[in-house]
Image: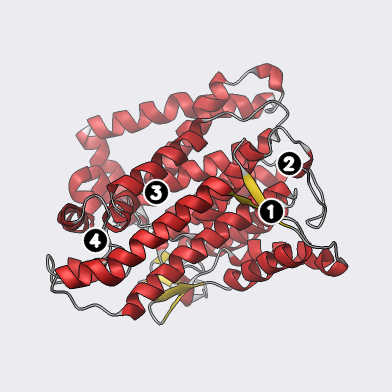
Amino acid sequence: MASTFAVEHRHQAAFKRAPLLLFLLGITLNQTSVIFDINLSIADVFAFLILMLMILTARMSIPLGPTVYFLVLSIVVITMGGFVVPNILPIEQSFTAVLTDYTKLLTSFGYFLLGVNIVRAGQARIVMRSYVFMAVLIGIIGVVGTTFPSLPRLEFMFHWEIRFSGLMNDPNYFALIQLIAMAFLWHDPDIARRFRYPALVILAASVLASGSKTGLLTLLILLMWRGFHTVFSSSNHGRYVSPYRALLIGVAICLPVLVLIVLLDYSMRMSVAASLDQVPTLSRLTPLLLDFETGIEADGSGRDSAWSDALPIIGLFPLAGVGVGTYLGIAAEFSDEPILAHNTYLQIAAEWGLVLSAIFLVWVGILLLRRPAPGTNMSMWHSTRDALLVMLIGSAGISLQNSRVLWLIVGMLLAVHLFSRNRQPIQQHSLTQKVEQ
């Protein structure tokens, strides 16, 4: 078990309202807005309040290893971004940009600690269920608005008037948010099947309504992953009823075959592409059928140019990275329209350096692949593992290094492993209850 240290104070009744804050946190994680070039969310308010209440009224566990890593990372990115890079490269740089980007990183670590502690206290399902509830409601709005465009609809939820983005500022990120809700919902043992299955269909349909290529590919991978997992899981576990198991086995077998047939048969690809073109939102997905490589770049994606710009930036300071607040300034030297890397792995390699980014990715990989000890809340492990898998797949097409939900999930998955031998923390307990480690 990884080492942790704790902040402990007296038990107080003030935290009895924590479930309400956790519920509101889950609801508002479905929303972000760009204000002063910063992605802000109402969830930040509730996250801050919960963290403060944890410190003031409870015993807050802080994983020692990740905390030391974060402190080292902070020193490196601030030193490189604030002092080294601006004095070596002729770029326009302000300390405000460094401070802004570091604040994003610090906020991400706050969500990581939040994820660790809500699982430790047994309150994670409150956040996850409210998150899913809101995602399904938003998904219904998107599916209805896309299917029946003549009906009155909430235009602010549609990007470029056709791509549904919900309460997010980016349709691609919205698609991943919905897929995370699918991962949470899939493994929640207390949600009745009559609610779970329709909700899963709505969430999947809302991904299509976003017109996100990254979302579509991630959805297909998630469906195949769940299908194969069902095929090879032991029937003695009793986690799936027969019709459901049969359906997923069929998906696991038929979906890869169907995709392969469509990709290999030119006339079938053209037929499917023509059908997709009839729906404005889905028309963005047709280039993937016509020419996959071109499709990734088409319709304003700009990923190949963003990726090609990221590589020379990584080469400038490969070991220590360019730090925070400098990436766009350096990218302006390589492109007339500098943008982020549209790839989390390239982005952190450029900003954090290859050494620290490699350590982080190896650690996340171990976290993802490692099976927890016997007696663990397995539904929580499956939920957080699949949600993290969604984010890692989506990271190939979006820069998610500052994603609130990503860091929350990483913290939750770590907590499942940290406290897997002590069953009490991952069962239902008050956040003010002390847990011996």
Q: Which mark is residue 394?
A: 3
Q: Which mark is residue 299?
A: 4
Tell me which label, 2 or 4, sits earlier in the chain. 4
Do the numbered discs 1 and 2 sit on residues whose CB atoms are within 8 Å? yes
- State whether residue 293 is above or below residue 30: above
- State whether residue 135 is above or below residue 231: below
- In terms of secondary structure, where does tag 1 sit? strand
- Residue highlighted by disc 2: 437
- Residue highlighted by disc 1: 6
Taking the image as shown, residue 277 lies to the left or right of residue 412, namely: left
Do the numbered discs 3 and 1 sit on residues whose CB atoms are within 8 Å? no
Tell me which label, 1 or 4, sits earlier in the chain. 1
Tell me which label, 1 or 2, sits earlier in the chain. 1
> What's under tag 2, amino acid-wise?
Gln
Q: Residue furthest bottom?
A: 36
- Quarter of the rendering containing residue 175: bottom left
> What's under tag 1, amino acid-wise?
Ala
The residue drawn where x is 67% and y is 28% is 240
